[in-house]
Image (spheres, rainbow, N blue to C red):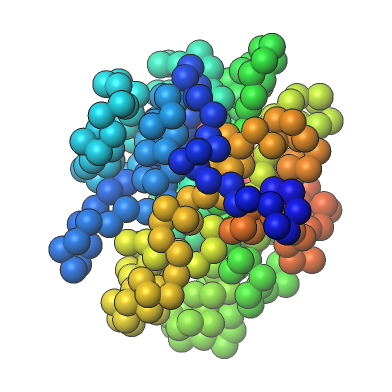
Amino acid sequence: MGSWFSKAWDPSTDIPDLSGKVVIVTGAKFAVNLQCTDSAGIGYTTTEQLARHGAKVYMASRSEAKAYAAIEKIYANNKSVKAGKLIFLPLDLADLDSVAGAAEIFLKQETKLDILVNNAGILTWDYQTTKQGFEIATGTNHVGHFLFTIKLLPILKATASKKGLDVRVVNVSSAGHSFMMPKLSFKLPSDFTYPGAAPCPPDHTGVCNQTSRNAVSQTAIILFASELQRRMDAENVPIISTSLSPGPTATEGQAKIIMGWLGPVWWLIKTFMSRSPEKGAVPSLYLAVGTEARVEPDKFKGLYFEANCKAVAPSKLASDPKVARALWDLSEETVKKWTS
């Protein structure tokens, strides 16, 4: 981003022409919230900006209704977006069968993939599990995205091998990775079923439990992004993998997942004290399409960025390359049924 006094990166003016680019954004949706007002998250805003600048965007989402609502809204608000530029891709990250199926659907329809934005995320007040039995935040935010990315890695690599093309994998994490992170090694299968801080209620509810579960999933995202980059560099594959925190952002999902019954109150607080989804999407867009990464890739590769689009060091655990490799090995073993 340059010096402290440099102009802030602005999607409306700084996104280049994306004609011919093929993109996947997970978790892109549009909904009407409990207050009966329109609500769009970071994934929706990211998708809208990419499509507005000419990209063909696959909106990978669990909810078909919300995905099509997003598609209709983007077309209605952006007359320049041509028909066929927005495509729904059914993806339930909490079910690895669905994850593998979504990747296979995409691979049958496209011959290239320029940008993958792993944006979707979940956090619950109580302890819940995915279809395969993982804690739902880690299972969705990391394990699901890990499998999805691995299944798409061959087409990402093939695209990167073509002259003049610029391939990126953007992983949305959060500053919450450093709050109440337990001492996990990411070597044990039980790390993917971690219930929360101890001692805890039988149903593992409570702010402490929720916060520590969130830290596990968000730390895993950062470690995955850095290890993916290390492996791409080792293979001399010019893919840029990054992770980021969008900052505190007022999105529709926050009222449902934060503080249980205090969700609506939290929603009001975040609405008046947090960034809009439009601002929350800026670091994702910057890392996905900003020209800076193409000009100086070493200033982006494997790094973690804050909401101001500046690279910073994440927590000590999230910066540990040995832990990153252990996490990759554990994740690879966990999803081998769907990759073999």
Residue 333 in percent (x, y) is at: 66, 42
- Choose top left, top right, bottom left or bottom right for residue 165: top right
- What number of labels is visible? 0
Figure quadrant of the C terminus: top right
Q: Nearer the viewer, residue 304 or 1?
A: 1
Q: Nearer the viewer, residue 62 or 165?
A: 165
Residue at the location (60% across, 52% down)? 8
Quadrant of res 157: top right
What residue occupies the far left of the structure in this picture?
A: 36
Residue 38 picture location, percent across and down: 22, 56
Q: Residue at x 74, y 66 (%)?
A: 315
Q: Is residue 32 above or below residue 286?
A: below
Closer to the camera, 153 or 12?
12
Question: Residue at 79% across / 66% down in the picture?
Answer: 316
Asked if residue 81 lies left or right of residue 93, the reply is left
Give me the residue at 72% from left, 72% from top.
183
Check the image and report above or below for 67 versus 268.
above
**From the viewer's perspective, is 7 left or right of 272?**
right
Q: Is residue 317 left or right of residue 219?
A: right
Q: Position of residue 91 (x, y in %)?
A: 38, 39
Residue 239 in sight here? yes
Relative image position of residue 189 (x, y in whole percent): 64, 57
Q: Is residue 93 visible?
A: no
- Residue 232 vertical placement versus 269 (above, below): above
Camera-side residue of 141 and 134: 141
* Image quarter of residue 34: bottom left
